[in-house]
Image (cartoon, helix red, strand yellow):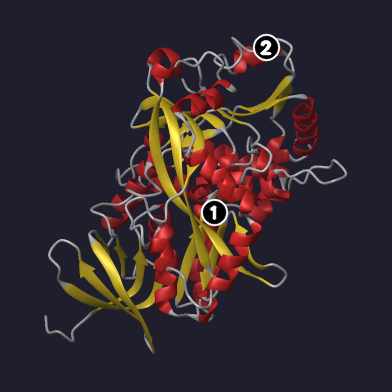
Amino acid sequence: MAQNDYETVDAVLVGAGIMSATLAVLLKELDPGLTLEVIELMESGAIESSNPWNNAGTGHAGLCELNYTPQAADGSIDIKKSVTINTQFEESKQFWAYLIEKGADKGTFGSPKSFITPVPHLSFVRGQEGIDFLKTRFKALTQHHAFAEMEYTEDRATMAEWMPLMLPGRDPQEPIAATRVMAGTDVNFGALTKHLLDHLGKQPNAQIKCSQKVTGLERNEQGWRVSIKDQQNGSHRTIQARFVFLGAGGAALPLLQMSGIPEGKGYGGFPVSGQWLRCDNPEVVKQHESKVYSQAEVGSPPMSVPHLDTRVVDGKKSLLFGPYAGFSTKFLRHGSLLDLPLSIRPNNIGPMLAVARDNFELTRYLIKEVMQSDEKRLKTLRGFYPLAKAEDWRLEMAGQRVQIIKKDAKHGGILQFGTELVSAQDGSIAALLGASPGASVTVSIMLDLIQRCFPKQVESEQWRSKLNEIFPAMADVLANNAERYSEVQARSDELLQLNEPAMA
């Protein structure tokens, strides 16, 4: 190929994690004629944030995460975020169910049991203040049809049935309470991503290329000229793409900066690493078959909410407890220590300094977490599991997350815990920044991206018809129509084989 020759495709998606894999498959369903390429820096897909040991694997549906239901000064509970996340997760389930059903005869997608498992979701609180909050939350949530099956108890015998590991050895005078929803899930996002990529690879005009690094993004009249270096042999190539998606986890921010689009100016990133305590002792693991979330300590960030989780990875059950936060200047677990300093620009240094000024408590929290001893970590675990033995648990590194720093008129800059889609005005490029609840609501995020970046196509009969086929009811309908919610959830659960007894 001559030096000036280049490939031409409709779309380039950077990063072979759950985000790009979902978008690529969705685009090919909407228009099988699209030509697209997924580019991955690592030697295979789902190595970074989508790797099952780099995230909690919770099918986030607002069932147990207490930070999704903030309490106002008057004591009332705001359930809007929980409802939104719950119905968005139902959108994700519809997409997965559609692919399972479509591939049932051809064997093109694999078994749902390989990536999604029924696991009850519980919330657990200690102390009278926590009980008052949980009770108010329960009353508020159960008024909405999405949470009608939630149970509440302050009875210790009932809690001993719900979470057998967590009651023995506990002070009998300690006030405790819990809620439970049996319809929770554990999701192996790594396995799901690989299913999506395998499915994509069987489609015409779709390629997944690994060990590829994007070295340049140049805008032109046809879209974007993407320069790529092969990490194995050092060769260079160029792709001309009408649309580019930057879904490379923490690396999305430097790529967004490389693009130079005005919509990306002012954004910075604050990297936070994570750690888990992991238990594989079958005698312990079999006694805890749920995901139990509690409240973060006062002054701790939302990402520090402690939880004791059943994980099902490649058919084997384990327990994870955490997360314990850490700090690294890397934007990816396999990244460079120079990632953070190299991301500083004249247009984002103001917001970054403002965040440093206003988040001293977060800095102190991270320092405390980094300096934490094994004994202190075990003490935190024993707040959940009083009889925990040190020899049953080992420390595991989790994935790297880059929280969003953005301009703010009042404060100069704010630190945002969540996800944000940044797109060019002409829809030719988009980047996904941020973290949780990310993977669980990937499908909803990608639907938002499609609305923004492919507005004319979405209005076409072909795309509208296919979207209606894949999604019998979108999140807004599910949030407001109890009967439709029940019908759609039941259909997805049947196709995803979630109707069997939890953790059978």
Residue 381 image point, x, y percent = 53, 25
Q: Is residue 95 left or right of residue 180?
A: left
- Which SS class for mark 1? loop
Give the residue drawn at x 57%, y 27%: 120
- 10 Å crowding of disc 1: few (<14), some (14-19), many (20+): some
Residue 116, by quadrant, is top left
User: Above or below — where is 481 with respect to 263?
Assistant: above
Give the residue drawn at x 63%, y 61%: 357
Mark 2 and mark 1: Cα distance apart in space:
49 Å
Residue 193 image point, x, y percent = 37, 48
Q: Nearer the viewer, residue 320 or 483?
A: 320
Which residue is labeled 2 in the image? 171
Residue 286, by quadrant, is top left
Disc assigned to residue 471: 1
Q: Nearer the viewer, mark 2 or mark 1?
A: 2
Residue 145 image point, x, y percent = 73, 39
Give the residue drawn at x 36%, y 37%: 111
Picture quarter with the N terminus: bottom left
